[in-house]
Amino acid sequence: AQSVAQPEDQVNVAEGNPLTVKCTYSVSGNPYLFWYVQYPNRGLQFLLKYITGDNLVKGSYGFEAEFNKSQTSFHLKKPSALVSDSALYFCAVRPFSGNTPLVFGKGTRLSVIA
Amino acid sequence: NAGVTQTPKFQVLKTGQSMTLQCAQDMNHNSMYWYRQDPGMGLRLIYYSASEGTTDKGEVPNGYNVSRLNKREFSLRLESAAPSQTSVYFCASSEAGVRTYEQYFGPGTRLTVT
């Protein structure tokens, strides 16, 4: 069965510093990987996805993620954090083959401090 | 283009009462989903519908029923609400099958069962 681990419940970073939100996955075969963001009292918004090809994926709002097959990781990164990036971030996975919906991690709360 | 809409936004029920959460999408997506979000638990899949006329159980289906009314609408019913069903409920949709594409989320329904 597929699963996602987000090892940090909370990440704090100063505004202007680079940020990383970690995600590791377990899936049979090749994965499809996704990052979503949730602002307070809102639904989830899609940020980016890895399907195949280049291991570095660029997404919305200046975010990017690096797929590392050997480490089964898909960490979310941004070179310079903004206060407005403060939100809850979810990593999700589905297997390349099979017919199952996304499985989400438990989420990481990012706080960017001015 | 409203995307995914959910009604109601908020609801308070007494234990044993029933209610139906409504979801509609205007993106002509084939697949629809119901998740619940609880603190520290991330998003957990309740039921999904890969296409009109089909429904399948997710990770936490007990106490819920669903109806895929047509291609646009997917409702979630609580027959006899319990305090353990206090949660935020999200509906989502995606193109084609459940396999490849990112899911688009509604704004959520915050349900409290007393």
Image (spheres, rainbow, N blue to C red):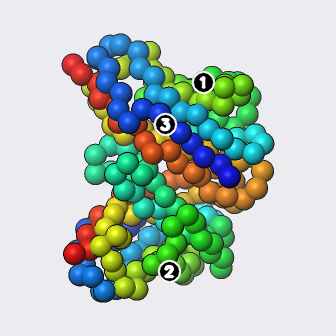
Per the model, the C-alpha gap separating discs 1 and 3 is 15 Å
Residue at 33%, 77% in the rendered image:
B82
At 50% from the left and 29% from the top, the residue drawn is A22
* Crowd class of label 1 (few under 14; some 14 to 19; many from 20; radius 10 Å): some
On the image, the x and y values in percent for residue A20 come to: 45, 22
Location of the C terminus of chain A (image quadrant): top left
Q: Amino acid at mark 1?
A: Glu
> What residue is drawn where x is 52% and y is 61%?
B45
The residue under label 2 is B65
User: Which one is in front in this view, the residue at disc 1 or the one at disc 3?
Assistant: 3
B68 vs A1, left or right, is left
Amino acid at dot 3: Gln
Image position of A87 with respect to B90: above or below = above
Residue B11 in view here: no
Disc 1: which residue: A66
Q: Are marks 2 and 3 in contact (CB under 8 Å)?
A: no
- Read off the residue under disc 3: A6
Confirm whether circles 2 and 1 share one chain.
no
Q: CA distance from mark 2 to mark 3?
A: 30 Å
- From what the image shows, is residue A59 above or below residue B20? above
Amino acid under disc 2: Asn
